[in-house]
Amino acid sequence: MEAFLHQVLAGLATGGIYASLALALVMIYQATHLVNFAQGEMAMFSTYIAWSLIDAGLPYWAAFALTVVIAFVLGVVIERVVIRPVENAPVLAVVVVFIALLVILNSVTGWIYTYTIKTFPSPFPEQPLFGIKYMSSHEMGAIGVTLAVLLLLYAFFRFTPLGLAMRAAAQNPESSRLVGIRVGWMLALGWGLAAAVGSVAGMMVAPIVYLDPNMMGGILLYAFAAALVGGVDNPGGAVFGGFLVGVLENVLGAFVIGNELKLAVALVLIIGVLVVRPSGFFGKVYVTRV
Amino acid sequence: MSRRQLIVLAVVLALACALPFLVSNYRTFQFTLVLVYAIALLGLNILTGYNGQISLGHGAFYAIGAYCTAILMDKFGVPYWATLPVAGAVCLVAGFLFGLPALRLEGLYLALATFALGVSLPQLLKNHHVEKWTGGVQGIVISKPDAPFGLPLSPDQWLYFFSLAVAILMFALARNLLRGRIGRAMVAIRDHHIAAETMGVDTAMVKSLSFGVSAMYTGVAGALGAIAVQFVAPDSFNIFLSIVFLVGIVVGGLASITGAIYGALFIQFVPNIADELSKAAPWAIFGVFLILFVYLMPAGVAGALRMALARWQAKRQND
Amino acid sequence: MALLEVTQLHAAYGQTRVLHGISFAMEAGSITTLLGANGAGKTTTLRALCAMVKTQGDIRFAGERIDGRATEDIVRLGIAHVPDGRGTFVNLTTEENLRLGAYTRRDGEAVEADLERVYGYFPRLKERRAQQAGTLSGGEQQMLAVSRGLMLRPKLMLLDEPSFGLAPLVVRELFAILRAVNERERVSLLVVEQNAALALELADHAYLIETGRVVLSGTADEIKRNDAVRSSYLGY
Ligand SMILES: Nc1ncnc2c1ncn2[C@@H]1O[C@H](COP(=O)(O)OP(=O)(O)OP(=O)(O)O)[C@@H](O)[C@H]1O
Ligand SMILES: [Mg+2]
C-alpha cells in the first residue's frame, strides 16, 4: 500500500510536468490547429540555457526567471521567422518544418554542450518538506511550481484584455482583425508563452531525468498522450490528462508492465484515443447556431 | 519510356555495375546502403508522397524487416536471400494492419500517431518478453554472405550486386504500380479526397493498401540493411531513423520515383562529409536542408532536375 | 470635407473581379445606404473599406488615404465594421464579445460606461452577459454584433444587413437605436440593406450598385421616387 501511494504521488509530480508541456501543446494547437513536434526540444534547449546561467554563478531563481524570459523570446522569434512562412502551407510542409526544428535544436544543443549527461540542480532542500516521507521535496516543489504556473496562465487568459484577445484571435481571426487585434502577433505571443511554460517543465524535470539533448523525447510523448486524453483543444483537460498520465505511467510501470515498457503506455494512449475518441475524453463540445 | 530515357537508364545501369570495380570495398559498402535507403525511401514516398499519409515512424517497418532477417538467419539458419520475401510479407501485413486504424486519422494526427510509434520503438524492441528472439539490448550479429558459384567477387561487391538486383526489381514494380490504376487512385485520394470517393474509388482499401505496400518496401530495405551492416540492435532504430527517411523524401522529391535515389545519396553521403565538423553537424545540416527545401524547393531535387531539363529543352527548341 | 471618399475602387477575389471602379462619398454625421441586388458587390465594398479584400483605387477617411493599410490599423481610426454573418466569437461570453469591441480603446472607465450604455439599448444582452455567445439566438447575435461595433465608439460604422434575421418589431427597434446613435453621438453610418424601403427611411443618401458599379445616386428621397428603384427594389 505504501509503495502504491508512493508511486501515485511520484506520478503526480511527473504528471504536473507532463501537464505543463501538454498545456504548451494545446495553446499552440488552439491558435493554429497544429501540433508542435519541437515543443519538447524547445524545453530541452531552454533548460540548457538555465544550466549555463547557473553554471555562470547566477542564483537558481534568478536563472529560472531569466530562462523563462529567454524561452519566451525564443518562442516568439521561432514563430515569426520559421513558422510564419508556412502558416497556410499543406500539413506535410508544416510537419516537416516542425521536425526540422526538433532536429536543429537537438543537434545544436549537442554541438554546444556535447552529448554527455549533466546533472541539473533542484531549488528545493534535500530533506523532505513538512516531514512527509512519501515524496521527495523536489517532487513536492515541482507540483507546487506547476500549479503556480497553471494558475498564472489561467488568470492571464481569463482576466486580462491581452489574454482575451489571444483567445479571440485563436478562435476567429477575421472578427479579431475587425476589432483591431493583431492576430499575427497573438500567434507569436502564444508561441512565446508555450515556450515559457515548456521551459518551466524542462527545469522541473531535469533534476529527475538529468540533462541530455534527448531527455525530452519520452516526455513529449507523455505530453501528447495527456493533451489527447484531455481533448487537444481543452487546456483544463490537458492539465488533468497530464496528472492522469503521470500516475498511470508510474503505477503501471511499477506494478504491471515494468519500467522498461513505460513508453508503451504513452503509445497505446495516443493511438487509442486518436482512434476511439479523437476529441479526447474532456473535449468541450461547443454549441453553435448557424 | 522514350528513347532518350532508355539511353539514360542504360548508362546509369552500366555505371552502377562498373562502380564496385572502381572504388574500395568500403565505398562499395556505402553504395550498398544507398540502394537500401533508396528502397526504403521509395516505400515512404508511396505512402507520404503519393498517397498523402504522413508517417514519422517508418523506422518501425525498417526495424521489423531487419529483425525478421536477423532472427531467421540467426535462429533458423535460413539463407539470407530467402529472408527478404518473408520480411516483405511480414511488413506488408503489419503495414496493412497499422493502416486500418490509421484510416480514421487525418494528416496531422497520423503524423502524431506514427511519431509516437517511432519514439517508443527502441523500448518495445528491448522488451524482455521477446528478448529470447531479439537479443534484447545486445541485438543480433549476423554474418555477411560470400559470393555464390565461386564468383570472383568480395563479399561487399557481391552484396552490392545482390542489392542492386533487388532494387531494380522493387523500382520496376513500384513504377508499374504507381503508373497504373491504383497509383492514380492513390494520388486522387491525396489531392481530392472527397471527389475520389464519389468517383467510386474504394478509399479505405487504397489507403490501407498503400500503407501495406509502403511498409513492405521499407521492410525489404530493413532486411537488406541488416545483412549489409551484419547487426541489428534496438538503438539503431530510434526516431532519428524515421526522420532520416523523411529528410530523404523531402530532399529527393515527394511523389517521385527517381527522387528516392537522390534522397538516398543525400542521406548516405552528406553526414559523412559533415561528420568531420562535429558529431552533431550532420543533424544540424539535415534540419537546415529540411527547412530550405520546404521553403525554396518543395519538389525536391527530382523536381528541380525536371524543371531544369524542361527549360533546357525549351531553349533548344527556340534556338 | 467628406468623411469618407471613395474613388474608382476596384476589388477582386483571386481572379474574380467584383468591383469595377466604384466612387462615392459621405459627409460626417450622415447616414448613407448602399442598395443593390444579391451579388452586386455591397458586402465586397464594405470589406474593401477595411482592407479585407485586395483593392485598387483611392479610399480617404477624414482626408487621409487608408487604402493599403491593415485592417487592424483602420479600426484604430474609428471605423467599426459589423460584418455580414455577424462575426460572433462563439466560444466567448456575450460580455467578452462586447469587451473585444473596445479592444483598441485605452479609456478603461469610459469603456465600462459604454458597456452599460449598450446594455441599456439591448437589455436582452445584459440578461445573457455570461452566456456563451454561440448559443444566443440569431437575432440576439445580430444585436451583439451591432453592440460590439458601438463599443469602439466609432466615428464611422459600416453595417452589413443589420436587419438580417430579425423580427419586424425588433428591426424597428434596432433602426430607432441606430438613428439615436447617429443623432446623439454623431456616428456616421454606412448601411447595406436588402430591405430597401427601411434603409431609405433611415438614410439621407443612397447609392445603387449593380454588378460592381454605381448606377444611381442621390438623396434618399430622390432615390425613393426613382421609377426603376421603385419597381425593382421597393416593389410598388
Ligand atoms: N470569397 C469570395 N470568393 C470569390 N467570389 C466571391 C467571394 N465573395 C464574394 N464573391 C463574389 O463577389 C460578388 C459580390 O459579392 P458580395 O458579397 O459583395 O455581394 P452582395 O452585394 O453583398 O450580395 P448580397 O446582397 O447577396 O449579400 C458575388 O458574385 C460573389 O459571388
Ligand atoms: Mg452581402
Image (cartoon, coloured by chain):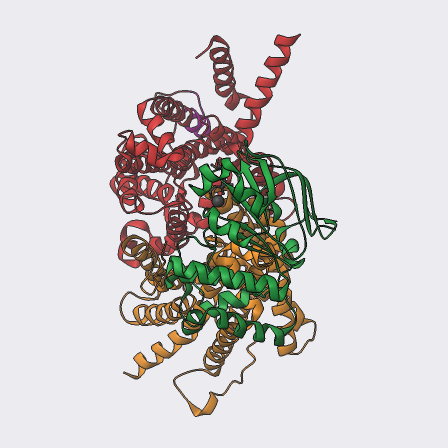
Chain colours: A orange, B red, C green
Magenta span main SS: helix
For residue C160, say whether it is visible: no
Residue farthest along the bottom direction in this orientation: A131
| Pick the front one: B278 or C128 | C128
Snapshot quadrant of residue B158: top left
Left or right of C224, for residue B103: left
| Pick the front one: A262 or B53 | B53
Taking the magenta stretch, the answer to whether it contains residue B169 is: no
| Pick the front one: C7 or B177 | C7
Part of the protein shown in magenta? B152-161
Measured as percent of width and height from the top left, residue A130 is found at: 46, 91
Left or right of B208, for residue A86: right
Measured as percent of width and height from the top left, residue A26 is found at: 45, 61
Above or below: residue B116 compared with residue B295:
below
Measured as percent of width and height from the top left, residue A275 is found at: 29, 52
Snapshot quadrant of residue C142: bottom left
Above or below: residue A240 compared with residue A265:
below
* Quarter of the image where the C terminus of chain C is located: top left
Measured as percent of width and height from the top left, residue B316 is found at: 63, 10
Left or right of B82, for residue A43: right
Q: How many marks overall?
A: 0
Snapshot quadrant of residue B307: top right
Above or below: residue A194 compared with residue A99:
below
Residue at (44% x, 48% y) in the render: B236
| Pick the front one: B139 or C206 | C206
For residue A50, say whether it is visible: yes
Taking the magenta stretch, the answer to whether it contains residue B159 is: yes
